[in-house]
Image (spheres, rainbow, N blue to C red):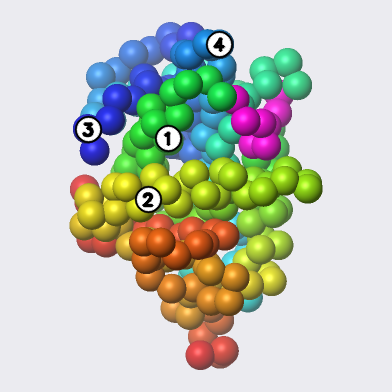
């Protein structure tokens, strides 16, 4: 994917990433992969390896990740390309893991972030789908990702051994 | 947060040991709780679900 990306820093375990979004403001962004522990507790097979992808603005003072904020920093494409880049890096250490993500929906608002993710997957689907399996949850069931279908959550896994 | 170690790697992602202090701080906990709640309610594709349910 030939989209410009931000330089990114990571923890040693490839689970936390930070970068600066530079637009009208400079915003510290963070991507966090968190394992869904005890898969059987949530009805999954005991050997399921699923990580949640959390992404948002990092409030260094509060030490928290805000995934509800709409930054409007004028660099959405570059930011999302940077987040997608962390997926590749994550899979170098966790090649069997699937990644679950859904857009945050602030109370009383529309799921804009989920739609944004979907639009970007749509746009790069031909390229992405050669290396990644993408599933979407459409409110009734999980299915292979289809363009022009609305989803509320996504699940991706490497299609083949990448490394 | 400035990197003290810069290793050139693919993906333009460098390891920053200063970030390791964040591990275990509970960052992202509410995100994973939301994911767990979603999965508990809606499940994941069939191949992930309990084998006894298949």
Q: Is residue A10 above or below residue A38?
A: above
Expressed as whole percent of the image width and height from the top left, the position of residue A62 reads 75, 21
Q: Secondary structure at mark 1?
A: helix
Residue drawn at the location 44% of the way across and 78% of the way down:
B47
Residue drawn at the location 49% of the way across and 38% of the way down:
A15
* Disc 2: which residue: A121
Going from the N terminus, do you reach mark 1 or mark 3 first?
3
Q: Nearer the viewer, residue A30 or A150?
A: A150
Going from the N terminus, do you reach mark 3 or mark 4 first?
3
* Disc 3: which residue: A2
Q: Mark 2, residues whose alpha carbon is within 10 Å: few (<14), some, or many (≥20)?
A: some
Q: Mark 4, residues whose alpha carbon is within 10 Å: few (<14), some, or many (≥20)?
A: few
Side of A112 where A108 appears, left or right: right
How many numbered badges does the structure rendering display? 4
* Disc 4: which residue: A25
Q: Measure how far apart labels 1 and 3 are at the Cα level.
A: 12 Å
Q: Measure how far apart labels 1 and 4 are at the Cα level.
A: 17 Å
Going from the N terminus, do you reach mark 2 or mark 1 first?
1
The chain that hosts pointer 2 is A
Q: Mark 1, residues whose alpha carbon is within 10 Å: few (<14), some, or many (≥20)?
A: some
The chain that hosts pointer 1 is A
Magenta region: which residues? Answer: A63-71
Q: Nearer the viewer, residue A54 or A163?
A: A54
Side of A85 where A42 appears, left or right: right
The chain that hosts pointer 3 is A
Q: Measure how far apart labels 3 and 4 are at the Cα level.
A: 24 Å
The chain that hosts pointer 4 is A
**Residue A3 is drawn in which quadrant?**
top left
Is residue A123 found inside the magenta-colored segment of the image? Answer: no
Going from the N terminus, do you reach mark 1 or mark 4 first?
4
* Disc 1: which residue: A80
Residue drawn at the location 56% of the way across and 90% of the way down:
B52
């Amino acid at each position: 994917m030939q989209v410009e990306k931000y330089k990114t820093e990571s923890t040693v375990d490839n689970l936390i990433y930070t970068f600066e979004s530079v637009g009208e403001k400079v915003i510290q962004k963070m991507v966090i992969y968190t394992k869904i522990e005890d898969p059987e507790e949530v009805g999954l097979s005991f050997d399921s390896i699923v990580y949640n992808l959390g992404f948002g603005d990092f409030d260094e003072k509060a030490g928290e990740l805000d995934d509800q904020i709409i930054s409007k920093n004028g660099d959405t494409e570059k930011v999302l390309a940077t987040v997608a880049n962390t997926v590749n890096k994550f899979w170098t250490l966790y090649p069997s893991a699937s990644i679950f993500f859904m857009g945050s929906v602030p109370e009383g608002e529309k799921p804009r972030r989920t739609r944004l993710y979907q639009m970007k997957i749509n746009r790069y689907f031909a390229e992405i789908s050669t290396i990644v399996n993408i599933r979407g949850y459409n409110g009734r069931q999980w299915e292979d990702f289809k363009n022009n279908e609305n989803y509320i959550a996504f699940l991706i896994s490497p299609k083949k051994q990448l490394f | 947060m400035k990197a003290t170690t810069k290793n050139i790697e693919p993906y333009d992602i460098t390891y920053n040991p200063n970030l390791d202090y964040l591990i275990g701080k509970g960052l992202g906990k509410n995100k994973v709780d939301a994911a767990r709640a979603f999965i508990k309610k809606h499940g994941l594709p069939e191949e992930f679900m309990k084998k006894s349910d298949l």
